[in-house]
Image: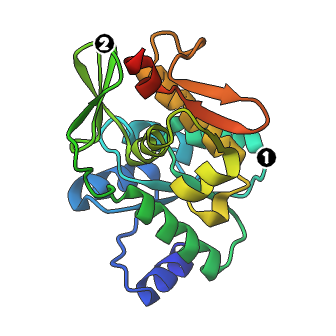
Amino acid sequence: MRRFIRMNMELEGYQVVEADNGLHALEQIRQHTPDLVVMDVMMPEMDGFETLKLLREISTVPVILLTVKGEEEDKIHGLNLGADDYITKPFSPRELSSRVTAVLRRADWPAPAPRTILVIDDHLSIDFNRHQVIVDGERVDLRPTEYRLLNHLVQNAGWVVPHDTLLAKVWGYEYRDETHYLRLYINYLRKKIEIDPANPQYILTERGVGYRFVDFKKKQGE
């Protein structure tokens, strides 16, 4: 599997570093600081889930998990641990290339907005240049996908953005049916910005349709 992936990635022009188990992978990541990690869940000594959990303590590098299981629970578990995507084995070189390209695209920060800090209210502000949110005066870092999702919602504040539109804009057109990604990242954002994530005030759910960021401009004008 490693030879297959290495050959195809090198044909695409990538430089590839290999590891044969989880501990070796963590050492290679510390040493080489890669732009992306493709990691099998089934590994000797330490599986991919455990390796990913340890990796997230030292790095935010994008991770694609490889799994032979197609059940949604395994996919959700990997995403909850911090994976950025997954591929179910067996897969084609074209699918691998497409997923790698999509994850690397999402990992790139969007161009800075002309404004620096947008004040939503006394509790929440957004620093567009630094890709951070400011909650009660404390800066909170966002992962690239979290920032892209929040940015798109804020730019459409007061409007319902459909599920498939958010998935296409934030993850890519090929992800427009992967609604579990959206649910997870909405939850991530709510935990970071909401006073009470269970009763959100900023990111509102329009059941069966999509999500809406509160119309803060209207509130500020009242």
Q: Which residue is drawn at 35% across and 70% down?
A: 17
- The extreme front residue here reads 222
Q: In which quarter of the image is residue 181?
A: top right
Q: Which amino acid does label 2 sit on?
A: Asp
- Pinpoint residue 204: horizontal percent, then vertical percent: 60, 25
Q: Is residue 1 visible?
A: no
Quadrant, the C terminus: top left
Q: Which of 42 and 128 is in front in this view?
A: 128
Q: Which residue is drawn at 44% across and 18% down?
A: 219
Q: What residue would you read off at disc 1? A: 71
- The extreme bottom residue here reads 11
Circle 1 SS class: loop
Q: Which of marks 1 and 2 is in front?
A: 2
- Pinpoint residue 169: horizontal percent, then vertical percent: 54, 57
Q: Label 2 crowding class (10 Å Cα cut-off): few <14, some 14-19, many 20+? A: few
Q: Nearer the viewer, residue 209 or 183?
A: 209
Left/right placement of residue 142 relative to residue 11 reads left
- Contact (CB < 8 A) between labels 1 and 2? no
- Pinpoint residue 131: horizontal percent, then vertical percent: 28, 41
Circle 2 SS class: loop
Q: Quadrant of residue 117?
A: top left
Left/right placement of residue 74 relative to residue 45 reads right
Q: Count every numbered label the image shows and give the total.
A: 2
Q: Which of 155 and 200 is in front in this view?
A: 155
